[in-house]
Image: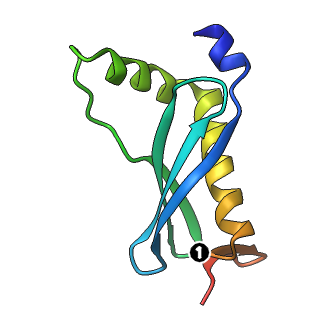
Amino acid sequence: MDSIISNFSPIVIECHGDREIGFSVLVKDIYSPFSACVDVDIFSDDIRVAWNQYIFFLNNSADLFKKSMQENHEISEKTFSEAIQFLEITKKIYHSKNGWHYVY
């Protein structure tokens, strides 16, 4: 697990949504089997990013792996940053001095 965390390099695989419902961004690590969706929403000029999956089956090894990855602060930071950056680059959201906004 330590080598996966130290080599973690996320990329965006796909993105769904719009400014009405927010965006769900699928992010995958290029060096491990880890992939997960994060939800990105903007409320009152503030951006909110959260893991899409929060229920895990404790008898499922894939779920346990995903849970342990999502609980790691470094993994969360890199994944959330990658999702936000993707949405900025693809002109779905932007940041100004007044906060975060959807592109209309």
Mark 1 Cα shell of 10 Å, populated few (<14), some (14-19), many (≥20): some
Q: Image check: 92 left or right of 33? A: right
Indicate the position of residue 68 as horizontal and vertical percent values: 45, 19
Indicate the position of residue 74 as horizontal and vertical percent values: 65, 28
Q: In this view, does 22 lie above or below 30?
A: below
Residue that lies at the very extreme toward the right in this rendered image: 97
Q: Image check: 31 left or right of 44? A: right
Residue that lies at the very extreme toward the bottom in this rendered image: 104
14 or 100: nearer the viewer: 14
Tell me if residue 100 can be seen: no
Task: Look at the image and tell me in which quarter the N terminus lies.
Answer: top right
Q: Image check: 58 left or right of 91? A: left
Task: Look at the image and tell me in which quarter the C terminus lies.
Answer: bottom right
Looking at the picture, which amino acid does disc 1 mark?
Asp
Which of the 4 image quadrants contains residue 2? top right
- Image point (47%, 77%), residue name: 18
Indicate the position of residue 69 as horizontal and vertical percent values: 50, 24
Q: Is residue 5 above or below residue 54?
A: above
- Image point (45%, 47%), residue name: 37
Tell me how many marks there are.
Answer: 1
- Image point (62%, 78%), residue name: 101
97 or 32: nearer the viewer: 32
- Image point (48%, 25%), residue name: 71
Tell me if residue 73 can be seen: yes
Residue that lies at the very extreme toward the top in this rendered image: 2
Quick one: SS at disc 1?
Answer: loop
Indicate the position of residue 27 as horizontal and vertical percent values: 56, 45
Which of the 4 image quadrants contains residue 21? bottom left
Which of the 4 image quadrants contains residue 20? bottom left
Q: Is residue 96 above or below residue 74?
A: below
- Residue bearing mark 1: 45
Q: Which colour scheme is used?
A: rainbow
